[in-house]
Image (cartoon, helix red, strand yellow):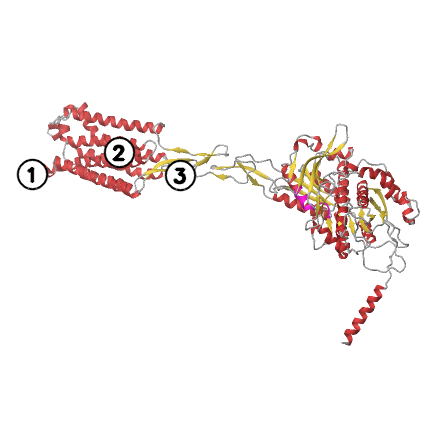
């Protein structure tokens, strides 16, 4: 308990000691370049000079103050814009009626070292009267600046712990959107997240897929380029090289220029700060590197300082994003007249200012801008500074509970944290008609112009607006560019091409080149049966089953349907032989009919012979059913007709064979076998054997009949229209039954071949069955292996060959005797009873 009381007393003593501590600046104070007192003070840091001269750091004497040179007209205009906006608000008695706004504007000289010095000066008063105590309160309510993202990050990190709001007009680095690290940071410019995406959309819209990339080696350039590279990859854009440098690294700059010179990409995306852009353009001019289509960012795309006759030689035709050019009413007159009279320190001689302010030597280089007004209309960042001042004013209007044309409660103590919270709620319409508000990241909506570096007929240079990007619109309407008004790199009217590989035409697909980016590819013709009907297709599409690709591989067309037709050569030849066989058979039948009373016809069972000739005619004709487009009826007819007619034919031959055998048996003493196989029994046997085949065919047609089928598996490029067997068992049963009868007939005829007759019918039947069986045995493997319409042709050939074999083997010898050897057409000769001549 005693220890606790002792500790409490110690802390109380230390606290009282701190409260009694007087504020004292260590070192020489740093004074603002431009300042004015007011009830509310807005600080600002601008790089009013571009170069900084460092003092000697030998530490033999106290270091001198940093000296700056090379006035930056653009940033000086921003300072003038800020003062103009403050004066405009102070004159408005209805906005902050009894409250005046003051300012303190410091020069960072484009240096991080000077920027830190300016920040510390802003956070402290320049002088302290005797007795002043350190109260922890900031002498300013908000800070406007910096111009570059890198120095703005330093500013925001330094002021962050003190909750001092910082509002930047041009720091667009996406890294500043992190509210955890930068809770009190705001900006009247959009994040580079939108700029990076807009650049990628610009490149894609213009059809470029092969680009180079160069960026400043700082937070601004690295983060912005990272966004661009990520979006470019999503949009199918390839980056040949991505290089970077910083303004203090001349060796890296030379390497960057060398890479750009050796690269094949004709388009270069330059995510550079203004200073780095100037250095890059200088080197490109020295090495006379032209013809590159530069794509720029807000930081330099519309900078009047960069566009000169010398730089236009290498940068003419550049495209880039720029802030919208907005006209601030009254500003032009102000910078030419009022500013130099009322706001410029050296114009004041009433003795109320410190000696530092009256020392006009530090302002001498600014006087060169007194009559310079050429760039007033080109200042695109001025409107952002103007909006930033008004955003602070609206926040203070809310915090001081101002009532229009009455008063504000100026006695209220406003802490920086309160200003931060008020800025989050700011929402007003400015004089340009734009809605001003800060989103959850502290930024405003992205709105850019697309500008083109062009040269007028009078020799002057201009940044011509050729399109826009507006993130507040619908995604389909955010981006627009008019390519017809663009002058491209080198003053060309034709858009440059920048691709690693030329576009693949329809009918081909892209094949990536190994080890190279996806934009480098070969064009491979689509395979048969595949198409691509668009340019730069990644894959070829497979045509549906009944379709095939045309010769150019750009369209799926119906496959050619293949079947054995009557009009093709093969069909005509088979029809000819079929009808020829019918004709020969009819002639044989006529001959037999005309010689029906001759012994040779009578001896060969004329009834079975005529029935056999009739069945052969049917066999020849059934082959015609296999030719032509298969239909449901033709498929059923061709197989059943083939099976039944051939069984009828073989049944007749089998009957003739049995007659020969029975006839031989009948000549033996005491044999009466012929009475059991007379004409009636012969007809009955033919009918019975044929009926069995009819039953098989009926069962086949009933259970699973043949049907037309489109075969798309055998040939990829065409459809075979064929008759599917339906039931393969039925087909092979029909064919097997024919083979069984033919084999039986062959065996019986073979047994009867040696019968002692002068005209042995069994020999001819044996030979005919041998041919028949040989044909159909060879038919089976040929039928199975033949493709398409050749399957049908093989079957027709087997039918015709076996039919001609039967016709020639059985009837040709008889016709020969009847026509050329009539003397042998006698009963005695047939019985072998004629006398043989001796020689």
Check the image and report above or below for 353 versus 724: below
Disc assigned to residue 728: none
User: Which mark's residue is nearer the viewer, 3 or 2?
Assistant: 3
Q: Quadrant of the N terminus?
A: bottom right
Left or right, 828 with respect to 504, comes to left
Residue 832 image-quadrant placement: top left
Residue 419: x percent and y percent? Answer: 75, 53
- Mark closer to the chain start, 1 or 2: 1
Residues drawn in magenta:
187-198
Q: Is mark 2 on a helix, strand or loop?
A: helix
Q: Residue at x 38, y 38 (%)?
A: 711
Disc 3 from disc 2: Cα separation: 29 Å
The answer, for residue 495, to whether it is visible in the render is: no
Asked whether, in this view, residue 760 is left or right of residue 262, the answer is left
**Marks 3 and 2, the one that precedes in the sequence:** 3
> Does 189 appear in magenta?
yes
Q: Name the residue under label 3.
A: 714
Please rate how many residues cluster around mark 2, counting C-alpha atoms within 10 Å: few if below 14, some from 14 to 19, many from 20.
many
Q: In which quarter of the image is residue 697?
A: top left
Observer-nearest of 557 and 282 = 557
Residue 561 x, y percent position in the rendering = 39, 33
The residue to which callout 1 is attached is 669
Q: In this view, does 204 lie to the left or right of 390?
A: left
Tell me the distance, in whole angstroms, between the alpha carbons under discs 1 and 3. 64 Å
Sequence-wise first label, 1 or 3? 1
Residue 476: quadrant of the picture: top right
């Amino acid at each position: 308990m005693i220890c606790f009381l002792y500790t409490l007393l110690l802390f109380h003593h230390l606290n009282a000691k701190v409260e009694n501590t007087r504020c004292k600046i260590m070192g020489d104070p740093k004074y603002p370049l431009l300042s004015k007192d007011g009830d509310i003070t807005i600080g600002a840091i601008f790089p009013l000079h571009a170069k900084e001269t460092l003092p000697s750091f030998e530490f033999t004497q106290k270091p001198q103050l940093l000296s700056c040179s090379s006035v930056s007209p653009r940033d000086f205009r921003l300072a003038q814009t800020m003062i103009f906006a403050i004066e405009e608000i102070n004159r408005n008695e209805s906005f902050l009626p009894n409250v005046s706004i003051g300012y303190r504007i410091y020069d960072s000289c484009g240096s991080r070292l000077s920027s830190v010095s300016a920040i510390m000066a802003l956070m402290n008063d320049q002088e302290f009267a005797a007795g002043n105590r350190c109260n922890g309160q900031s002498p300013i309510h908000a800070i406007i600046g910096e111009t570059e993202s890198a120095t703005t990050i330093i500013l925001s990190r330094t002021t962050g712990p003190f909750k001092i709001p910082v509002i930047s007009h041009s720091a667009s680095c996406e890294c500043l959107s992190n509210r955890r690290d930068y809770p009190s940071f705001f900006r009247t410019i959009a994040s580079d997240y939108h700029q990076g995406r807009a650049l990628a959309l610009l490149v894609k819209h213009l059809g470029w897929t092969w680009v180079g990339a160069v960026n400043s080696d700082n937070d601004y350039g690295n983060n912005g380029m990272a966004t661009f590279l990520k979006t470019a990859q999503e949009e199918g854009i390839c980056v040949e090289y991505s290089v970077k440098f910083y303004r203090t690294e001349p060796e890296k700059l030379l390497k960057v220029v060398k890479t750009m010179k050796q690269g094949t990409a004709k388009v270069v995306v330059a995510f550079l700060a203004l200073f780095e852009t100037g250095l890059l353009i200088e080197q490109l001019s020295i090495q006379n590197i032209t013809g590159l289509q530069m794509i720029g960012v807000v930081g330099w795309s519309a900078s009047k300082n960069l566009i000169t006759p010398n730089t236009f030689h290498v940068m003419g035709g550049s495209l880039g994003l720029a802030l919208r050019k907005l006209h601030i009413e009254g500003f032009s007159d102000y910078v030419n007249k009022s500013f130099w009279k009322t706001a410029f320190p050296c114009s004041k001689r009433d003795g109320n200012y410190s000696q530092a302010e009256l020392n006009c030597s530090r302002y001498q280089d600014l006087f060169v801008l007194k009559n310079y007004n050429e760039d007033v209309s080109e200042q695109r960042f001025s409107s952002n500074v103007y909006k930033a001042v008004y955003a602070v004013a609206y926040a203070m209007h809310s915090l001081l509970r101002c009532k229009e044309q009455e008063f504000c409660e100026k006695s209220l103590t406003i802490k920086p944290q309160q200003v931060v919270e008020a800025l989050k709620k700011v929402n007003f319409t400015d004089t340009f008609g734009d809605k001003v508000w800060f989103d959850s990241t502290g930024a405003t909506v992205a709105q850019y112009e697309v500008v083109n570096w062009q040269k007028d007929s009078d020799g002057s240079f201009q940044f011509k607006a050729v399109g826009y990007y507006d993130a507040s619109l619908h995604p389909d309407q955010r981006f627009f560019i008019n390519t017809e008004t663009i002058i491209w790199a080198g003053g060309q009217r034709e858009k440059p091409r920048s691709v690693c590989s030329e576009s693949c035409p329809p009918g081909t697909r892209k094949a990536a080149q190994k080890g190279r980016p996806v934009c480098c590819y070969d064009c491979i013709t689509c395979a048969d049966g595949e198409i691509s009907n668009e340019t730069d297709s990644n894959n070829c599409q497979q045509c549906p089953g009944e379709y095939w690709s045309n010769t150019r591989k750009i369209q799926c067309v119906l496959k050619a349907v293949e079947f054995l037709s009557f009009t093709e050569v093969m069909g005509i030849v088979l029809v000819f032989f079929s009808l020829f066989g019918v004709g020969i058979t009819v002639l044989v039948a006529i001959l037999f009919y005309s010689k029906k009373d001759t012994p040779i016809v009578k001896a060969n069972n004329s009834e079975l012979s005529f029935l056999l000739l009739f069945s052969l005619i049917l066999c020849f004709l059934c082959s015609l059913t296999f030719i032509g487009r298969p239909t449901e009826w033709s498929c059923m007819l061709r197989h059943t007709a083939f099976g039944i007619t051939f069984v009828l034919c073989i049944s007749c031959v089998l009957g003739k064979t049995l007659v020969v055998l029975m006839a031989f048996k009948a000549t033996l003493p005491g044999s009466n076998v012929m009475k059991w196989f007379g004409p009636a029994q012969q007809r009955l046997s033919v009918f019975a054997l044929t009926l069995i085949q009819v039953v098989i065919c009926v069962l086949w047609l009933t259970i699973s009949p043949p049907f037309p089928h489109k075969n798309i598996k055998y040939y990829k490029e065409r459809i075979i229209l064929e008759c599917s067997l339906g039931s393969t068992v039925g087909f092979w049963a029909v064919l097997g039954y024919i083979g069984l009868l033919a084999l039986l007939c062959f065996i019986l005829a073979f047994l009867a071949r040696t019968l002692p007759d002068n005209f042995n019918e069994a020999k001819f039947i044996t030979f005919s069955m041998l041919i028949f069986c040989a044909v159909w045995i060879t038919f089976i493997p040929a039928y199975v292996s033949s493709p398409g319409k050749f399957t049908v042709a093989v079957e027709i050939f087997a039918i015709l060959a076996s039919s001609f074999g039967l016709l020639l083997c059985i009837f040709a010898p008889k016709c020969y005797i009847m026509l050329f050897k009539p003397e042998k057409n006698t009963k005695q000769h047939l019985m072998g009873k004629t006398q043989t001549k001796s020689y």
